[in-house]
Amino acid sequence: MSVNRAFGRGVAWMAAGNWLEQAVNFAVFVVLARLLGARDYGLLAMASVFIVLSESLVRESLSEYLIAAREAGARELNATFWLLVGLGGGLGVCLWAIAPLAAQAYGEPQVATLIRALAPSVLIVALNAVPVAILRRDLAFRILAIRAVAGVILGGITGIGMALAGFGVWSFVGQWLVLITTNAVLAWGAVRWRPGLDVARADLARAAAFGGQVLGLRAGELAGTQVPTLVIGATLGPEATGLYAVAWRLVETLSFLIVTPLRQASQSAFAALMRQGGDAGALLLDLGRLTGAVAIPFFAGLSLLAAPMIAVVFGEAWAGAAPVLSVLAAMGVYICIARVQVAFCLAAGRAATVALLAWGVALLMAGLIWLAARFGIAAVAGAVVVAHLLLWPLYFRLVAEIAGRRVPGLAVCHLRPLAGAGIMALSVLGTMRLLGATHPVAVFAAAVPVGVAVYLGFALAAMRDRFALFMRVARGEEA
């Protein structure tokens, strides 16, 4: 099977699995948020800063070496596995040790217990990383999709059951531990390889060299997402942290619905094309055109309809999250387009450069957030968006250099979706103005169809090429 056809099938499986996974995840998230409230969610967000960072350092870090490497035999697999075991175990011990310090910094003693309860998840994710990398390298996305859905269903049942039984914030802990354990069991059951001791120092050095660069990238990306939570938690307290965390979770979840199937399938496809001497840059350009055509209008609409959406989904008690969501919606566009760009750079072995850019964004954002915190959580959200947009042109420049293309060629393809989103926004605002102070459900029910119809009309008139492109990519056909 050609790489393009395998990629098309991979995207289809990952899209179906990811959409179902995120739908279940979102439903569980809404139910738990309604049952437990902003304070419990804020406490979880405070503890999760450290857990999410640690898990990300082992989830897709050292194992990325196996995706980009020309050969991935038993020795390469063993070397990567034992490095991950050491890293995951070390991070787990560090989490246990720093938990009291984190709780003291927040002024919330319960945070220490939450961090220690979640710490084993890091080692579980580390043990799971190599089997997942094998499946990704083999483009076995059907198995990955089934595994992900099973995890969120079992984790969701556990979390909601615990919440109804009165376990409070511990419901989140139970949900997460069951989810990642299910993922690990299913991934190991899908691969024949088992770890061994057949590994040389040179194998460890090669895996560590590339993996270390990806570790730097993941750390920078996680710093970029977790710094706002740290600053809000330290300056504005758990309730404000919960409001920000809910808004960010919405943006992150919705952006993952769009980009995760493309990102996960595309990195393997980019690497395979580069190994075979194919035109990975052409695939990158196609994916950029598709991603922008969907993400730009989607998140423009989310920004405009943040208040009624929060009221409908979470209830009036969460109304304080609406201004934050309205601002953070711009990050959805960034995540969708930049994630594919990063996948391309990793497939090309340019992890170190991307890591430097990620840390540049994180450091710039930390400074801007510290200045903005005194003005409230909406100002913090604005600082997050500004920091990412200011350095985004550097990502375009790096990707253009690797692909052998010009920066304008990668950026201009987003102008028509921007124009269409602008026209759509005017129609949505007009609809909302006509409805006035109507119930949020009525506003949502009227404004969404109007916005969709206007944008689709624009797309049919000015972007018919995107429909043809979607069918070609889905079928795995050559350009």
Image (spheres, rainbow, N blue to C red):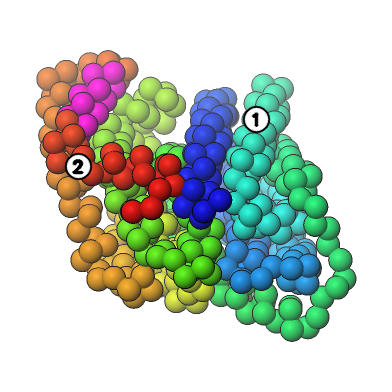
Magenta residues, dominant SS class? helix
For label 2, the SS is loop
Query: Measured along the vertical axis of the image, is residue 278 above or below residue 146?
Result: below
The residue under the point 37% across, 29% down is 310
Q: Mark 1 vs mark 2: give the one in front.
A: 2
Q: What residue type is labelled 1?
A: Ile
The residue under the point 66% across, 42% down is 143
Residue 22: x and y, percent? 52, 35
Q: How far apart in space, not on screen, are marks 1 and 2 (Cα)?
A: 38 Å
Mark 2, other Cα within 10 Å: few <14 / some 14–19 / many ≥20:
some
Magenta range is 444-456
Residue 419: x and y, percent? 14, 45
Residue 24: x and y, percent? 56, 29
Q: Mark 1 points at which residue?
A: 153
Instruction: Answer yes or no: is residue 417 visible.
Output: yes
Q: In this view, does 315 lie to the left or right of 178?
A: left
Inspect the magenta stretch and tell me whether residue 352 lies in it. Answer: no
Q: In this view, does 453 lie to the left or right of 191?
A: left
Mark 1, other Cα within 10 Å: few <14 / some 14–19 / many ≥20:
many
Instruction: Answer yes or no: is residue 384 visible.
Output: no
Query: Measured along the vertical axis of the image, is residue 110 above or below residue 30?
Result: below
The residue under the point 25% across, 69% down is 407
Q: Which amino acid does label 2 sit on?
A: Met
The residue under the point 46% across, 52% down is 4
Looking at the image, which is closer to me, 288 or 418? 288
Label for residue 463? Answer: 2
